Amino acid sequence: MRIGIDLGGTKIEGIVLSDNGEIINKLRVETAGDYYPALLENLCAVIDALQASAEYRLSVGIGTPGALSTNGEMKNCNAIALNGQRLQEDVENRLGYEVRIENDANCFVLSEAHFGAAMAAKSVFGVIVGTGCGGGLVIDKKLVTGPNSISGEWGHNCMPANARALIDTDRQCYCGRTNCIETLLSGRGMSISYRDATGEDLTAIQIALKAHEGYAPALACIDIYANHLAHCLATIINMIDPEVIVLGGGLSNISALYRAVPSRLGSLVFTDTVKTRIAAPSFGDASGAIGAACLWDR
Ligand SMILES: [Zn+2]
């Protein structure tokens, strides 16, 4: 058994996960993400409560927005109060034992690699297509991390030029670069593509619904999106050759992608037959806490 915590901007969700991936206890508290001392206290209270339900002390993994930078401080968190804070150190000092912390995209991939859509695979790349485009790599059930803590961050690579030709104008990314994958494949990216083509302002989910109803401009937008995604995933397959790529985030709910993307990969990947499976996620919102628990073997 292990404890997994999904720390979000507005809620803390904690679970106790059994060794075979069953959620055997669950606790969710709302929290104001803008005041760090309260956030820390609520987080530790959730962990204490889950520990109290077990007969021995359980390992604790925490999934957070943003990342732990090399100096021990949190960065790039949408729960703004976390930025610049030494979260791991503070939690460990308060609890008196070691915890592990990873960003929520990495936790998503771990959850799918251990108990979800990719549980039979040895190598899994997970891509988040939602508000942003994050990702992570799991090999032999272990997260691959590196000296820069950016393993799997495919969203701030530049969109391949052949695919970029499908759009008219360059897109500035908040990271300072131009035409980052995220500027096209995030939900907002899809909305901008649709607006540029039609003059209409719709969210990605609205566009997907209209496409489902057969509305031609929406179908065309999804088609271009699938083409962009296929180009980006082809570069990942050429580099890593994972058995499975699992999609996550809000746009992973667009079922048309699971036909349109694989059908394009054949002409983009440097091989005769592409065997990499593009899979829908198994867990949805629960993946953060499940994956955080998987930061420990048991
Ligand atoms: Zn960027």
Image: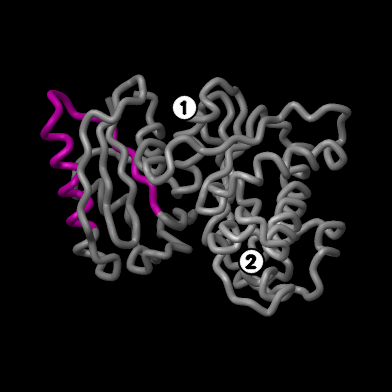
Front one among 206 and 232: 206
Query: Which residue is at 56% across, 24% downward?
Result: 140
Dividing the picture into quarters, in which one does residue 162 lie? bottom right
Query: Tag 2, which secondary structure?
Result: helix
- N-terminal of the two: label 1 or label 2? 1
* Image location of residue 80, percent across then percent down: 37, 68
Instruction: Give the residues in magenta.
Output: 40-64
Of circles 1 and 2, which is in front?
2
Front one among 165 and 57: 165
Q: Is residue 266 visible?
A: yes
In what quadrant of the picture does the C terminus appear? top left
* Image location of residue 65, percent across then percent down: 42, 56
Q: Is residue 146 visible?
A: no
Q: Residues within 10 Å of mark 1 (few under 14, many from 20)?
A: many
Tell me, yes or no, whether the two marked residues, 1 and 2, touch with CB atoms within 8 Å: no
Looking at the rendered structure, the kind of residue marked 2 is: Gly
